[in-house]
Each structure stands twice: as C-alpha cells, then as structure tokens.
Amino acid sequence: MNRRTREYLKGRFGDYYRSASVSPPPQANEREWGHIPFTAGDGTTMVRHQSLLDIGEVSEFLARETPRHAYFSAARYDDPANKRMSDKGWRAADLVFDLDADHLPGVDPEATSYADMLAACKGELLDLLDLLEADFGFDDDDLRVVFSGGRGYHVHVRDEAVAGLDSTARREVVDYVRAVDLNYDGLIEKRPNERGTLQKTLRVEGGWGRRVHAELVTYAEELRAMDEEEALATLQELDGVGEKTARTIHGVLERNPEGVKAGNVELGPGASTLVRAIAERVTAEQTAPIDEPVTTDVRRLIRLPGSIHGGSGLVVRPLERGEVASFDPLTDAVPDRFRGRDILVDVHEPGPVDVGDDRDKAEEGIVSVPEYVGVFLMARGRAEKARE
C-alpha cells in the first residue's frame, strides 16, 4: 500500500482503539505480547518478546501504537519478555484451535467467495464445538470462541486440566478431533447379553463409538421406513455388501430394532463392513479440519480479541456461545467506527465486496464507497486511498 493509504488506515485504526474497550486475556502479565506495525513497503515486521511491563495498559498501548495486527501468547511464562524462548520459563498454555476457511476440504479459494468460505468455516466451527463440549466435557466457562477477523475462527480452551499438556499430548487431541488413524475395529467390543452370551457391541458410552452408534440407529430407522427392495439396494451401495449379506443385515435390523439401539452389532456376515461404512461417514461429517500446528505449538502467538485485523479491517470478535449460530462476520465484525460516511478509494482490483450490508461489486477506478468497504478493500490490497 502507498503512504496515503497506510497513513489513512493507521489513523482510523487509532480512532477505533481510542473509542474501543479491549480486554486483555487472563494472566495477561504472564504472556508474551507482539504486534505488526504499519510499515512502508510490502514487507511486515513482527515486534515480539514484550510483556505488559513493556507495553503498559493494553487499551492505551493499542491507541498509542495503532498496530496493523496485535497478538498475545497462548503460553504463560515466568519471564515473557525474555528474547530467548528457552529462557522464558514456560508454565502452561491455553489449548487453541484454529479453523481457516482457505484450508477447508472441498473449498477452492480461487472459486469460492469470501462469504461462502466463511459460512463453510462456521459449519466446521459448530462441529468442533460439539466435539469439545460433548466428547471432552468442556463448558462455556472453559471455551472462548473468537472470529479471527480474517478467514476463520479461533477457539481457546482455558481449563487448567489441559494447560500443562505438551506438544505430543496436544497432537493426540488433534488426532482425536480429526479422527486420524481411528481404530474402527476398536469401536466394537464383545459384551455378554441378557443370556450371558458374548456379542459384538458398539462402545456407546462416549467418543466416536457413541457418534457411530447414533448414526447407525438413524440409518437402521431409515432402512425400516423403506420397502424391502429399496432397503436392500441401499445396503448394497456399501462396498463389500452383496445381495445375500444385505438380506441378512436387513432381516436382523427388521427383527431386532431394540438390539441395535442397545449397540448390538451381531448382524451376521457383513456387519463389520456396515459398521465401518457408517463410521467413515460419521468421521467425514463430524470431524473438524483444525490447523494442527496451531494446537500443538505450546508457544503460539494468537490474535488479540477486540483488535482489528490489518488484512480486512474487521474486528477480531469474541463471541458468546449462544451468538455463534447467528453470527455473520461480514456484518457483525464491521467496526461501528467505520460506518456512517463514504470515502473515495482508487480500486485497482474490481469485483465482489463480501462485507457489510450492501454487498455490491467494486468498480475499477476512483469510486465513493461506505468507509468500511473502503477500509476492507485497502486492507486487502485491492484499492488505495484517493484524495477527497
């Protein structure tokens, strides 16, 4: 960006920070702080290895320095300002999850709009929250959901029970959330039935076994609602299930619906094929494509909630759990400070503008747009500030 654009954005970010109330994270004095200032040229400079003693009160620091990006460490240290990571004295770290719209399976960033990518990312966020709440037992007091201001969402887990986990243990959490190398056979165990006979039973008490069982019950109910010919054809769509095996499975599902609800998977030949197919469907639909390095890095810097993302002009918005489903980042994360007036920008990359209330196309050349649209275009490198 050129000097006029840089100075304009820096000035308006400063206006935002002078009127905003940005709350620091818990144990803020034990965390490392970092920021990227507005600098000339295309490169960026990260200023880090700072503590609260260096920067002072957070809101005053933001208003004074008006950074392009602001960060704090997920980790807590004895000496957060020490320049050597090995000498900081690591104490603990939040367990942080990052979902990035650019890296979602099935999403092509070149062919998908910014709005559609963020919508897909919120769907993955809801899956992640369900896993963290239902499978790990975290509650609203443990979880902090944050729109990153850019391409996705962060989830901070602040439960002291996981704060001391090292990178290896955090990788195990990642593997669970992403169902990496899930032992499908291990979802089934042999248990005695009411007659004392051992039978194959899904582990339904929790985890992926519970999820697979719920899907199997739903699948069985759907099959029972079909006529026999349709149900047999549906079963034969599964790899390894022929007509004879399909008839055996269908007969058991018809005769013993309560057994399936109890987790019984003694369905005859092909039962393991059915369970594995259901399990693969469940893991494909309910895993969350989190960014592994963010979760496993116990010294990660993460964006400061309440700050402005310098690549979009949107607020890094903390969200209450009940807000997540209805949250529209491209409207709800627009700073109020940037609403209410129009400005002139020189657009050199025309096209759709996926932000704000009126999501129109930006035409090439000097145009008048709502300020938040202009800030978005300038922050993303699609326009420069024009003379008023």
Image (tube, grey):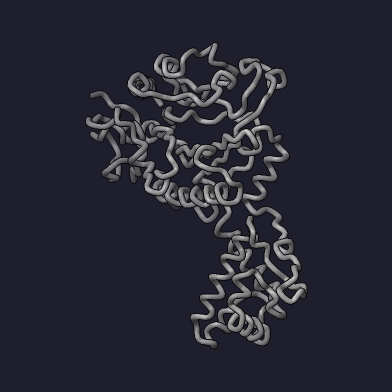
Which sits in the foreground, 279 or 259?
Answer: 259
Which sits in the foreground, 265 or 330?
Answer: 265
Rendered-image quadrant of the N terminus: top left
Query: Against 80, is 236 above or below?
Result: below
Q: Position of residue 69 (x, y in %)?
A: 47, 26
Is residue 346 visible to the viewer in this orientation of the structure? no
Q: Position of residue 358 (x, y in %)?
A: 26, 44
Q: Position of residue 279 (x, y in %)?
A: 63, 64
Q: Position of residue 77 (x, y in %)?
A: 64, 21
Q: Quadrant of residue 231?
A: bottom right
Q: Quadrant of residue 385?
A: top left
Is residue 90 visible to the viewer in this orientation of the structure? yes
Query: Against 204, is 387 above or below?
Result: above
Rendered-image quadrant of the C terminus: top left
- Could you tell me which residue is drawn at 65 percent across and 36 percent down? 161
**Relative horizontal placement of residue 224, taking residue 200 as reference (left or right):** left
